[in-house]
Image (cartoon, coloured by chain):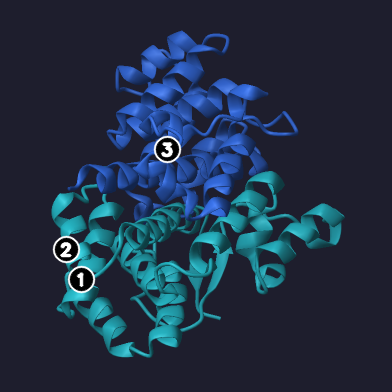
Chain colours: A blue, B cyan
């Protein structure tokens, strides 16, 4: 699907062919390609099932917002809005409180995203219980964790590239 | 939550979620383990991540490209950035892995001793201090690395390409820390 082929980091940073950031990213083609394919398999998995597309984009939107990563948040908000029921879900997440206007299952995922993003070392063995109580399987918990952690990576890569380009 | 201090000892890791049973693993799952690294077949961390094979395949390839890719920033500096990021997040398991790699490559156990005892702000020579400062500020949520940290790295002789390599290592560590800290816990073997 073409909407998962365009490089997300280039797109949110406005990187154009031949620009300094394009050249900087070209120093590590494998890293650039695998960053994008990580995004693709997490948000457009080859074997659909597990977390739904709106759930995946909702969690990513929340994580990007917690990082104040506005362009990436805009990207995930737009992707979420393309999904059935996505606009209402995006509005609920933008309002800040995960409990308002979302299902208990999504609320549990968003609360987990908050902990993993902001205070991962506070996690202990009961941290997955609210997810299991909402029926998430082990595989879904792993995918959820990969999405949250991937966005933490993606935010930092994009922020660093922007910072390098902006610092004279 | 970790119940012991930073260490360079080899640690085990136990998941809080049931991992994939290797006796039932598909050939593709076993192939991904072998792509991930030499210890993946015996690591419960990798057995757990096998629940999402495509995600693990991309994650491992990316990890290996960032931490082991040839040229650019010396590997020891990438390991130092990953160590600092892991100390910042109190990821004892991650810090042990990256600190051992750093010592092996740089032959500088004194640097790790200081970081483990005094934290990410420990006194270090200017080049290492610049690497640690950038890594710790990028580890924050939201990240707070800024022009001052970039300038310090350039003053220490890093090119923009080197800085981007360091940023990738720190960012990858931010990913890895979150999986390691929130899906299980370190144990003494």
On the image, the x and y values in percent for residue A151 come to 44, 40
Q: CA distance from mark 3 to mark 1?
A: 37 Å
Q: Chain of mark 3?
A: A
Q: Chain of mark 1?
A: B
Can residue B84 be seen in this snapshot? yes
Question: Residue A8 or A48: which is nearer the viewer?
Answer: A8
Labels 2 & 1 near each other (Cβ < 8 A): yes
Same-subunit check for callouts 2 and 1: yes
Q: Could you say which disc has been placed on residue A113 in the image? A: 3
Label 1 residue SS:
loop
Q: Chain of mark 2?
A: B
- Residue B18 vertical placement versus B102 (above, below): above
Residue beneath the point at 34% across and 27% down: A71
Q: Quadrant of the N terminus of chain A?
A: top right
Crowding around mark 2 (Cα neighbors within 10 Å: few <14, some 14 to 19, many 20+) is some
Residue beneath the point at 45% across and 9% down: A87
- Residue A96 vertical placement versus B177 (above, below): above
- Residue B61 vertical placement versus A115 (above, below): below
On the image, the x and y values in percent for residue B183 come to 52, 53
Label 3 residue SS:
helix
Same-subunit check for callouts 2 and 3: no
Of tags 3 and 1, the one toward the viewer is 1
Can residue A141 be seen in this snapshot? no
Q: CA distance from mark 2 to mark 3?
A: 33 Å
Q: Quadrant of residue B134?
A: bottom left
Q: Could you say which disc has been placed on residue B156 in the image? A: 1
Q: Which residue is mark 2?
A: B152
Using residue A109 as the reference point, say whether residue A100 is left or right of it.
left
């Amino acid at each position: 699907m073409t909407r998962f082929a365009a490089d997300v980091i280039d797109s949110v940073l406005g990187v154009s062919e031949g620009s300094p950031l394009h050249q900087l990213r070209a120093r590590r083609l494998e890293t650039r390609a695998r960053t994008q394919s990580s995004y693709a398999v997490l948000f457009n998995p080859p074997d659909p099932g597990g977390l739904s597309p709106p759930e995946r984009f909702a969690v990513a939107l929340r994580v990007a917002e917690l990082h104040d990563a506005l362009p990436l948040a805009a990207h995930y908000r737009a992707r979420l809005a393309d999904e059935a029921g996505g606009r209402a879900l995006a509005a609920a997440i933008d309002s800040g409180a995960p409990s308002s206007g979302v299902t208990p299952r999504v609320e549990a995922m968003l609360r987990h995203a908050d902990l993993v993003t902001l205070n991962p070392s506070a996690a202990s063995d009961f941290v997955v219980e609210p997810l299991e109580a909402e029926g998430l399987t082990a595989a879904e918990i792993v995918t959820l964790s990969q999405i949250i952690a991937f966005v933490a990576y993606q935010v930092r890569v994009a922020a660093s590239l922007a910072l390098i380009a902006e610092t004279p | 939550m970790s119940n012991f201090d930073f260490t360079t000892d080899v640690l085990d890791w136990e998941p809080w979620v049931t991992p994939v049973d290797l006796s039932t693993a598909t050939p593709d799952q076993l192939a991904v383990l072998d792509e991930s690294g030499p210890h993946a077949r015996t690591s419960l961390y990798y057995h757990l991540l096998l629940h999402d094979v495509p995600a693990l395949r991309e994650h491992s390839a990316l990890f290996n490209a960032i931490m082991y890719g040839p040229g650019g920033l010396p590997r020891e500096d990438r390991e130092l950035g990953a160590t600092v990021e892991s100390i910042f997040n109190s990821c004892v398991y991650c810090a042990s892995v990256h600190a051992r790699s750093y010592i092996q490559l740089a032959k500088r156990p004194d640097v790790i001793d200081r970081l483990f005892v005094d934290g990410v702000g420990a006194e270090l020579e200017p080049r290492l201090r610049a690497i640690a400062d950038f890594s710790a500020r990028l580890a924050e949520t939201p990240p707070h690395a800024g022009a001052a940290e970039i300038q310090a790295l350039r003053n220490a002789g890093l090119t923009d390409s080197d800085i981007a390599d360091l940023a990738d290592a720190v960012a990858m560590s931010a990913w890895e820390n979150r999986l390691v800290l929130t899906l299980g816990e370190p144990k003494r073997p």
